[in-house]
Image (cartoon, grey):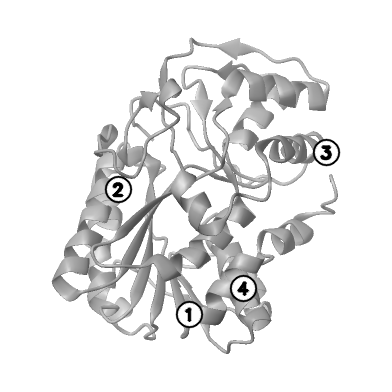
Amino acid sequence: MAGFAGIEELEERLSEPTAGAVAALKDIPGDIVILGAGGKMGPTLARMAKRASEQAGTRRRVIAVSRFTQPLLVSRLTAAGVEPISCDLLNEEEVSLLPDAPNVIYMAGTKFGTTGNEPQTWAMNAFLPGFACRKYRRSRFVAFSSGNVYGLTPVASGGSKESDAPSPTGEYAWSVLARERMFQYFSAALGIPVVIIRLNYSCEFRYGVVVDIAQQVHAGKPVSIDMGWFNTIWQQDANAMVIQSLAQAASPPCILNLTGRETLRVKDVAEQLARSMHAAVKLTGREAGTALLNDSRRAHELFGPPRVSAEQLIEWVADWTERGGASLDKPTHFESRDGRF
């Protein structure tokens, strides 16, 4: 499949460290705890951190914390040298028993299913960070956030910058801004160095905006262009930049947008996917002059640009989808303009 024989080879590539990730972990000592590591991105990020540490010649534990409802995931992480720990992160007693570490990557959160389950979303996104900060008050943090905190921005602007004031739409985006505020509060109160990563959007072959569009085209379903533009980044590049960002932790927190170089038009991507898969494309809706977009130039200046272009990613996803490759069956709902997920 476009050079990827299957899931094992895909995950091997997604967790392959870049030179930048190796160099970062050569300079940063100590174990790494990844909170909320059982999601779409966490397992390959954990494996990359372990592989980068080994290549850097630094001995460290990489500890992945999640509920871990899939035994296969636990066994695969263990085989890769990562230490999985099952934990309910909303249980403060369980959190207090987690091993200490000087480096924490915080990935825990809720997005999908927010509508109709708002209290759980706020508990995960706004309440839980306080547990983590009190537990790891002597650590540095990389805390995942989302470009949703900015709200819609004119396409012609090139995307929201870190200096732009947040303007969230919908309870999910507000709860993510609350997560940021909690990290900012505890960073000031306890002197915790923090990096806040506003991600829009990580993509691999089984999940992401390009995958959503590819699956719709392949199935002959109409593709909405109501959210006519988007950003995305190959997950391997995102993993590497997150690891490199550990060195940027500061108090007050450093805020970094993380996404690809290109502003992509949904219509153009759908048509490119259709050509690659020898399919017809159906479009619905109307393009607006605004979209949820990030300007990630600051991160690219710090860590270097993404190694995989959007064009290459689109070709890979088209091939994988056309051949019936596995999917996580978790649509991004990127087309939502009202903040409801």
Which is more N-terminal, label 1 or label 4? 4
Q: Nearer the viewer, mark 3 or mark 4?
A: 4
Q: Which residue is under mark 4?
A: 22
Q: Which SS class for mark 4? A: helix
Q: Which residue is under mark 1?
A: 28
Q: Which SS class for mark 2? A: helix
Residue at mark 3 to residue at mark 2: CA–CA distance: 36 Å
Which quadrant of the view contains residue 290?
Answer: top left
Residue at mark 1 to residue at mark 3: CA–CA distance: 41 Å
Residue at mark 2 to residue at mark 4: CA–CA distance: 30 Å
Which quadrant of the view contains residue 115?
Answer: top left
The percent coordinates of residue 129 (x first, y second) are 27, 64
The percent coordinates of residue 253 (x first, y second) are 28, 61
User: Circle 3: is it few (<14), some (14-19), or many (20+) Cα within 10 Å?
Assistant: few
The percent coordinates of residue 181 (x first, y second) are 21, 54
Q: Which SS class for mark 1? A: loop
Which is more N-terminal, label 4 or label 3? 4
Can the viewer see residue 197 in this picture? yes
Q: Which residue is under mark 3?
A: 323
Q: Nearer the viewer, residue 237 or 210?
A: 237
Residue at mark 3 to residue at mark 4: CA–CA distance: 34 Å
The percent coordinates of residue 26 (x first, y second) are 56, 80
Residue 176 numbered tag: 2
Dot 1 amino acid type? Ile
Dot 2 amino acid type? Val
User: Circle 2: is it few (<14), some (14-19), or many (20+) Cα within 10 Å?
Assistant: many
Q: Nearer the viewer, mark 1 or mark 2?
A: 1
Dot 3 amino acid type? Arg
- Would you say 110 lies left or right of 93 here? right
Which quadrant of the view contains residue 196?
Answer: bottom left
Which is more N-terminal, label 2 or label 1? 1
